Structure formats: C-alpha cells, structure tokens
Image: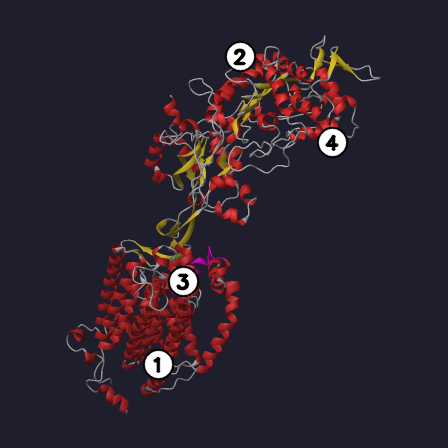
Amino acid sequence: MRRPLTLKDHHHEQRIFGVRLVVGVFLVLLLTGILVSRMIWLQVFEHSRYTTLSDNNRVQTQAVSPPRGLITDRDGIILAENRPDFSLEVIIEQTRDLDALLVEVARLVELDEGDLERFEKRRRAARRPWEPVPLRGRLTEEEIARLVVNQHRLQGLRISADPVRHYPHDILFSHVIGYVNRINAQDLDNMTLDQQRDYAGTHFYGRTGIERFYEDQLHGQVGYRQVETNARGRILRVLEEQPPVPGQDLRLRLSMRVQQAAYDALGERRGAVVAIDPRDGSVLAFVSRPGFNPNLFVTGISHKDYSAYRTDHDNPLFNRALQGRYPPGSTIKPMLGLAGLDTGVTNWQRSIRDPGFYQLENDPHRYRDWKRWGHGRVDLHLAVVQSCDTYFYDMGFKLGIDNMHDYMSQFSLGQPTGIDLDSESKGLMPSKQWKKAFRNSPWFHGDTINASIGQGFVLATPLQLATATATVASHGKTVIPTLAGERQPVERTDLLLKDESNWDKMTNAMVDVTGPKGTARIMAVDAQYPIAAKSGTAQVFSVGQDETYKEEELAERMLDHALMVSFAPADKPAIAVGVLVENGRHGGSTAGPVARQVMDAWLLNDEGELDVPAVFSDTGPAGTDTPPSTPDDSDEDSQ
Amino acid sequence: MSQREFFRQMPGQTGASLSPGLAERLHLDAPLLAALMLLMLGGLTVLYSAGGESMELVIRQCIRFGAGLTAMFVLAQFPPRSYRFWAPVIYTIGLVLLMLVLVAGTEAKGAQRWLSIPGLGRFQPSEVMKLAVPAMVAWYFSERNLPPKLIDVLGAMVLLGLPAMLIGLQPDLGTAILIAASGLVVLFMAGLSWRLIAVAVIVVVTAAPLMYFFVMHDYQRNRVDTFLNPEADPRGTGWNIIQSKTAIGSGGIDGKGWLDGTQSRLDFLPESSTDFILAVLSEEFGLIGVCVLLIMYLVIVGRGFFISWQAQDTFSRLLGSSLIMTFFIYVFVNIGMVTGLLPVVGVPLPLVSYGGTSIVTLLASFGMLMSIQTHRRLISY
C-alpha cells in the first residue's frame, strides 16, 4: 500500500469542517423545529382534548347516598330508624396480601366463620372497582381502638361509619315492616338506568315488608360530590357538591299499642292476628308468630342464625298473616248467610230441622254437624249464633258453588285484598272452572257442601278473614287493607245488598255469638262495647309428608286450628279483627280472647273507658299524642 | 493566510476576548458557563415542583451540579493536546472496564451497568466512554488525512462500534446508541462522504425491522410496541406516555402555573422528576416555558458550535463538535420520547432531569469544550 507523504492540508480540512458545521447547525435547527411543532400540536391544537383527559384523571364524581326515610306508627313512635354503625371494610385493590391481612385482622377483632364466608362471597360477586367490601359490622369501641392503633400495618383496611337500618322493636314488627339488607349486583341488574343512578351510593335495599313495598319513597334521591383525587384514589379536596334528597319518612296507619296487644295476646302460640279499621281500611295490627329479629338481616345474617331460622319447625320466617292459607271454617258463615239472603235462597224466617247431619237425596253419605245430636229447629239467626253446620249445608247446596264464589269474592275471599305488601297470597275460593282447570275433575255436590262450612277446597289468609269481616262491618263498602300511604287499586266493588237491613240483622246475629248462648261468649265477658263475632275451627287434614315430628309434637300439630273473626263496637264498628291460632282447637276459647285484647287496646283508653280513636288522618299523629294546645277545649270544660 | 483566518486572529473577534480577566485565567468560557448556570437554575425550579416541593431532592441535585462543575473546572485546565495524548489510553481502559462489567458487574433492573470498585464505590464505565469514544475517534482522524478514506471509516466504525456493542450487551440500548452517535458525529464532521451517508441511512432503515425481531430484548421490544401504539395497554406499558402527553397537552400555551400541574402533583405522571421532567415543565409553564427551555439549549449548542468552529486543530474541532452535537441529541431524544415522537429509551433531559452520573459527565464534557476555547494560541502555526 502506498502512503503519500503529503502534509495534512489544514485549510482543506477546515473547509470541509466548516461545511459540515453549517450542515450540523441546519440539522439542529430542523430537529428543534420538529420539536417545537410537536409541542404546538400537543399544547395548542390538542389542548382541549388533553385538558379533558387530565380532568378525568383527577376529578372523580362520587355518589352520596340519601338518608333512608324513617318509619313510624300512626302516633309517631319510631319503628325503623338509621343508626351509625362502625364496620370494617377492605379495599381489595389497596391490599398487598389479602390472606395475611385477614389473619392480622382476626388477631385484633373477632371474626367468625360467617364473617369470612360472607366476605368471600361479596368479594367474588360483581362489584365496582375500588368499592370497599364489608368484612364485619357492629364494631365495638374497643375493637375500633385496637384497629386504629394498628392501622399502619393494615393497608387496604378502613373503618366506616355508615348509617345502618335499625328496628328498635325488633321482633314485634318483623312480618310487616320487614327489613333491608345489602344491595347486590342482581338488584341493580333488575333496575332501569335511572334507578341504577339513584342507587349509586346506596348500600341497602328494602328486601321484605313495608321496607320493600315503599322502597322508592323511603330511599330518596342520590347526591353527588366531585372530588379531586390523586393517582392512588385518595381524595384531596371537594370541588363541587350536590346534596342528596333524603328519603321520605313513612307514617304507618299501624298502632304500636294494638300491635303490641296482638303480639302479647298470641303469646307463644303459632298464629296470626290482623286488625283493620273498617272505616278507612287502615291496618291497625299485623302480627304473625313466631317472628324473627330483622336487625340480624341488615348487615348480613350469620349462617348459624339463618339456618336456625330455616330449620325451626315453627317456621318463624313464614308470614302466616299474609301468606298462610288456612281453611276458614265457620268464620265465613255470616258472609255465606248474606249471600243466601241476597239470592233469596233463604230468609230470616225460614227454618230447618237439624238431626245432626245433612243428607243429599239418593246419597247415603251423611254430612255431620259438629253437634252429634243436632240443634233441633234452626233458623239463620240461630245457625249463626250456634254455628249450625247442617243449616249451612242445606243453604249452601241450594246457593250453589258459583253464587258462593261470586259473593265471597266481594268479601276478598279468593281475591287479593290489595294490602300494600308484596307477595300476598290470595287464598282459594273454588269454582267449577277452577276445579276443571287445576284439578282436572268435575265439580261434585259434596264439594259445595264442604265449601259451605268453609272447608273442602276453601282457603283464606288471616288477612283475608280480617278484610272480609271489615267488609261486613262497613256494610259492604270495599275495604282495602292499607298500612301506609294511598290505597292500592283493587278489582272489587262495593257489595250492595238488595235489602240493606240484612247487614244489621246479620250483625245482630254475630253480636249474639258473643252472647250467653253463642259460641264465643267467653270473649265478651265484661266488655264495655257490643262485639260482633264468628268463631271457627278448621280441621288440619294433612301434615307435610317430608316433615318429621316427634310423637307428642305430632299429636299437637294434628289439632284443629282455632279461628275468630270479630268487629266492634257492633253498632259503630271501628275495628275488625281476624285471629288464627294454629292447633288452637276451639275458636271461641282460644282465638276469642286474643281478639278481645286487640279490640280493647284500640277502643279503650288508658283508664279502661271506651274511647274510640278518630279515623287516621294524613296531617299528623292523632289521638293520645295530640298536643293539648289544639283549640278543641270543649272536652276539658266538660270534665 | 485567507481573509477569514486573518479576521479570526484579530483581537476582539474571539469569544474569549468578550470576557477577559478572571474567566480567561481560570480557563472558563463565560458565555457558556452563564448559559449552563441559567439552565441548571431553571431545572432546579422545575425539579422542586416535580419532586413534590421536596427541598431534599433539590439539594441533592445541587450536590451533583457541584460535582459536575468541579469536573468541568478540572478538565478545563488541561489543554486539548493532553486529551489527544490520553485519548487512546483512557479509551482502552474504558473498553477493558466494559468487558469487566459484563463479567463482574452489579445487576440493577435486569441490566449489568455498574462496576463496584473497592474503596471507590460503584460507577458506570459507560459514562467514561461517553467522553472517551468521541475523543478516540477524533484522535483517530487527527492522525489521518481528511476527508476519510473508506478504510479509515471502517477503522472508526470499529472504534465506536466496539464499546457500543459492549454497552448494548449489558443491555443498555439507549446509552449504546448515544455513544455510537457521538462517534458517528465525529465521522460526519470529519467529512464522511455523502454517498456513504446515503448508503448508511438505507441500511439502517432496512435493518431496523430485523433488529426488532432478532436482536432486541423483550423489554426493548415492548418499548417499541408501546411507542407505536400506547393506547393498546393504557394501564400498563402505555401509561407513561399517555400521562406524559396528557400533562403536556393540558398545559396549553401558558401552562397551569408553577406548582399547579395536576398531572405531576397528583402522581399521575410517573418518573416526573427524572426522565419525564419535561412533561412537568410543559404542564406548568406551557408552550412558552418549553420555548424558553429550547432557546436556552440552542444558546448552549450555538456556543458549542462557535467554539468548535474557532478551534485551531482538527482534533479539537472534531471533539468539540461531537460533544455539542451529542448534547443536542440528548435533548432531542428526551423531548422526542416524552412527547411520543420517539420510543421511551431512558435518556434524561440534560441538566434538568434529576440524578444520574450523566450530570457529571455532561458538565465534564463542557469542561473539555471550555478547554478547547481557552487554550488557543493567538497564532496557530
């Protein structure tokens, strides 16, 4: 290789360098230009887009749940309220090691299997991201203190003080007020979009009873809060706030006093009591025993408690008043009698001779009266007073099942009463079509005869019996049992009898039921007001096949159900009561006194004097709680 | 003597004569130093906000600046000919250290970059090579006639390729590319023929996809994927660039105000005090702030070009222009990546980003530029 021995040409090199330097400067300016145009693109042309993105980053809209409306009785006594409850929640997204955290927490506060089980279930259920998952409710002060001291080691854990529904009279109203419990994804799925928005911040949802039926009113409207958060979701400040609209308070037409009396009167027996003011349909008492403690359900019932309720043979979760279908027995005789009168099948003068049984022509079968040797000569009045079965076999057969069905429907038997509660059972008032459709069998005469003493296919709920009685008390005016608010629309119309005097005549017969010769004489002893009543006894003809009972229990549960319908004061009715005592044997002696105590609670004042309360008014609590400042001072003068 | 040469030797025409006296005697270039100080001061202001008003961060950065300025001052005292003399030695030592790193280096974040020397602590040999490689290539060409012949070009390619490859194996692709670039700049300044440049561009463009599929590590490939489509994984790998662009874009023309940038202050912007500090500046000071910053960089780069132009020998010219061009490449790559023009390669914004040995290295390189400027003889030869 040849290497020319030339000196370095410095000027030439410098010239080349100079050119390259100029190119370099040009390149630098070009690249700077690119950067500047990129910046202008981002900061000027795309500015608004990125401003939105930036605001979306930092600004979060949070829902603020409205306080749930309170529930009171007609006198303003609180039946459902909101109490702060300190609960432990886990924000799963913030935890590092969930299992280790739970072990740590279990060392500080009591966590039972049920807590962990429910936590696990909620954790796996569909939920919003970053939404805290409740771990345990009802923390004690001591537990809170222990948690706070150790908070630095418990990342992802927080203690929240949420208002939680509380029922101060727990078991007393369990089957009428019902309860709320935690809202779940399924509840939200069943809502419209508007509703979902309203439940954005809500933790609880009305599950049964009044809480469910009036959920919309009690819930209120959600509020919003715009907050600035950092990248880890921590709230730094509140930018804007729209307060929630609190749920409406609900004043029930129930009376705490009557409810308590009904509950106490039933005692430890299984049964139901429904009391209705026939003047306006107000439900005064609605009891089903045994009941349950609704407070257990609010923050999540433990598995142990729940299975105890489920396996109890007395079935405390079952709403006997609303859904229990029982043969009404003789309690429907006054209504049947009115049907017989109105159709002309019978009248007050007509009488029959009762040999202790009824027999159809060409049929050897004897339909027996409860009195083996018979009542002798019996007219309608006496048939009601002594509950003569034979009279009603005869009359019912002449009336026919179709007439019976039509008239009984007017008394809401076999029809929904229209009470403001969900899942009402409409009982059963059979007809020929019904038997054809559901039993695929023709109607027999025997079916009619059984139905005419409230047996056979006929089934009614205690609520229906009370409603039917209230209808008698109101002389056929449609009674819609109402717990709160507006009456629900029903298909029934007022029952107009061809002879209006039959109402009073039937009432007289029912008053004599509580008279010295009547079947319910026990219940009217020392009463300050006339009571119209009709007792009933319903045969228990079957026991569930897959249920097992102990020997002595079996015997007890085979006994007849005791029933009683009544209203008072008979001349100016202000209360109608339906009572059912399961396996109570005799309506008159078992169910009667229960009904009497309920009526006393409503009709008598504290001094034991007759003091019929006014009809429920929407404007405010009436009766005993009315302040003395009202200008109604005539009473004071007379004293 | 050409007319230009004549004027250049006239007193009063040189940069140094603008600031006679103390700076001259300390071998410091006053205009360059002033521009650097201004930039660092501005950088500290942004850092204070980016670090969440942490004075501690600012003080630690000041300590690094102090160390860097010391290195700058020391290096400025040596005349360029001593760099030229020591370049091959330091380059060779650096090469050996790079090999040592691969064998005995300390691992951090999946890459071996650090070398622990007992008693001296840890340091990154690649930082030394940022200065040694341009010096070495400049030395190589100062020994040869320019423009370089093909064989010389190949020689230079080996000189810059070897350390780049070793650093790339650590793996630290960003630094490898920047070091290779500093050598390539020397090649360009030495007068690499345009035809070769054109060939090289074509080769790179065709080789890029092959690199992607056969050479790159997974994490590097991810970065490229993210660069091409950051929205594909907005919560994961795309997060940085989306948040960065959001910060910049929401800043607008006049910004949200100092200490008021929500993206960085509320922790949406990751690496806000280091690689992505420009996003903080853009968010809080807007387009105006960005332009001021770019002007500062242009002043520094311009002064660097001026010094290179005035340099009296080939080695100084090539070294000076390479150092200043590399500095600009840093600026361009960082801003490019933060604004989504380039993939995220982990290059800090020079003298503004927090931390790293890069601050010391950068200021040291300005010391070398000042040496070139202040050790000129009035009559060159």
Which three-letter amino acid code belongs to the residue tagged 2? Answer: Val
Q: Mark on residue A525?
A: 2
Residue nearer the viewer, A492 or A299: A492
Quarter occupied by residue A146: top left
Q: Position of residue A228 (x, y in %)?
A: 37, 53
Marks 4 & 2 on one chain = yes
Query: Disc 1 is attached to a residue of which chain?
Result: A
Marks 2 & 3 on one chain = yes
**Furthest-left residue in view?**
B21
Marks 4 & 3 on one chain = yes
State which region is magenta. Answer: B233-249
Question: Pointer 4: residues within 10 angstroms few (<14), some, or many (20+)?
Answer: some
Query: Disc 2 is attached to a residue of which chain?
Result: A
Which three-letter amino acid code belongs to the residue tagged 1? Answer: Leu
Question: Which SS class for mark 4?
Answer: helix
Question: CA–CA distance between discs 4 and 3?
Answer: 69 Å
Sequence-first disc among 4 and 1? 1
Question: Which SS class for mark 1?
Answer: helix
